[in-house]
Amino acid sequence: MNKSFYYLWGSISFGKLALSLYTMTITLTIFSITHSATFASVVMLIHVFGKLLSSFVFPLATEKTPLKKILSISLLTQFLLITIIVGVLTLEINQVLKLTVIYSLIGLAGFTDGFVSPSRISLIPELVENTKIGKANSLISTTDQTFALLGWSVGTLAINYFGSNLVLIGTLTLLLVSFLSSLQLKTRKVKEATKRPKWESIKTGWSILFSKKNYMRTITTMDILEGIASGIWIGGITLVFVNEVLKKGEQWWGFINTSYYAGSILGGILITIFSIRLQKHLIKAIITGSFIVCIMVLFYAINTTAWISLILVVLMGPFYQLRDISQQTYIQKVTAYDALSKLYAAKDNLYYLIFALSVFITGLISDYIGVVYVYYFAFLLYLTSSLFAILSFRKSNQSSQIDNVVRVNGK
């Protein structure tokens, strides 16, 4: 690993912690101002909506602007917007006006955040040797989950002890460190693309997502099926499951969430250790991860003992990570560098749409059939995804496939 990767790693880690603290603090602050859970929940909705809009603009920005520059400008803009939010929160103005301004700034911050994520992921193959891409993804995924857990677990205590204003100032400090780290990246200058219609730039990523080449259509189909199934981890569904099936209170809801992060962190560490061996069997790893998660979700649905549920959630983590990290490494290896950022923009766009659909479907099943059937439904989706992948990949030789693509791309 070179210095630039470690700067990118630091930028991602500090940025992730900052975003967790920022989201929690703003949500609690809005709740304290309005005393309304609805107004508080709108914070995340607006942030995600801003990211959704940015995913359409991002491919256009990458046509002539290097990813490093996009990343740095986005982080600086995000820092300035949150600084303004902190300033607005201290003003004694009409509550409706204050909320309108804050929500608008949150949407803009979400819009800029939509440029940050695909830029960071797309920079990894540029900064890391081809044989170490899997290890790089594992390290980033592990710290990503660790700082997310740290932000959500320590955030409430920090707010109660220091107050929301100081926590937001701490958030700004972390964002500033993330921005300064991004300035240290040294990459090859991105070649300017030939001038083409805007729609051509936007649809490039979508074309790759659903292309038969390199099994991208198969991977995208798996993402859609498993993305809908991922609704089982939405906070409201988990809480209902804990109350109605496990017969436990809100404290155990927290235990389940913590176990999920703990399992993901454990999985990231294990994959980092075996990353070199894993890179030779990426397709098999994708299928294995999906299938074992499928079986564990079924056991989770059948089980009614709280302690066993915690163990199952922890055990799922490594296999979720196995599937996700292997998929990300595979995509980075088989996709041309100049198209990678557009691909991730399209993937983000698809993710937001699937997430909204997942929330709707799982909510309906929970309300009208029963929350346990949400998990049975997820099991069927994971099973369908695994079987579909096995049928699609059964004649493939994953190692030779990657070697051929790498040779064509000249890496």
Image (cartoon, rainbow, N blue to C red):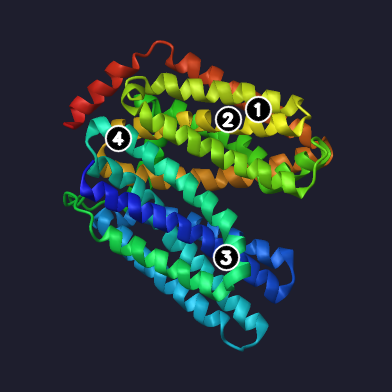
* Comparing labels 3 and 2, the label whose residue is closer to the camera: 3
- The numbered dot on residue 316 is 2
Mark found first going from the N terminus, 4 or 2: 4
Q: In the image, which disc is placed on residue 243? A: none
Label 1 sits on residue: 297
Q: Nearer the viewer's eye, disc 1 or disc 2?
A: 2
Q: Which amino acid type is marked by label 1?
A: Val
For the C terminus, the image quarter is: top left
Q: Are marks 1 and 3 in contact (CB under 8 Å)?
A: no
At which x and y percent is residue 234?
Answer: 65, 45
Residue type pointed to by label 3: Ala
Q: Above or below — where is 272 with respect to 162?
A: above
Q: How far separated are the C-alphas under marks 1 and 3?
A: 34 Å
| Residue 264 visible in the shown view | yes
Q: Residue drawn at (31%, 26%), measured in percent from left and top?
A: 276
- The residue at the far top in this view is 395
Label 4: state its secondary structure. helix
Q: Foreground: 399 or 9?
A: 9
Give the image location of residue 255, x and y in percent.
67, 43
Residue 210 in sight from this viewpoint: no
Label 4 to label 3, Cα distance in Å? 36 Å
Across and down, in percent, residue 37 comes to 73, 64
How many angstroms separate mark 4 from mark 2 (CA)? 23 Å
Judging by the rendered image, the residue that carries numbered circle 3 is 158
The crowding category of the residue bearing disc 2, from other C-alpha atoms within 10 Å (few below 14, some 14 to 19, many at least 20), is many
SS for dot 2 = helix
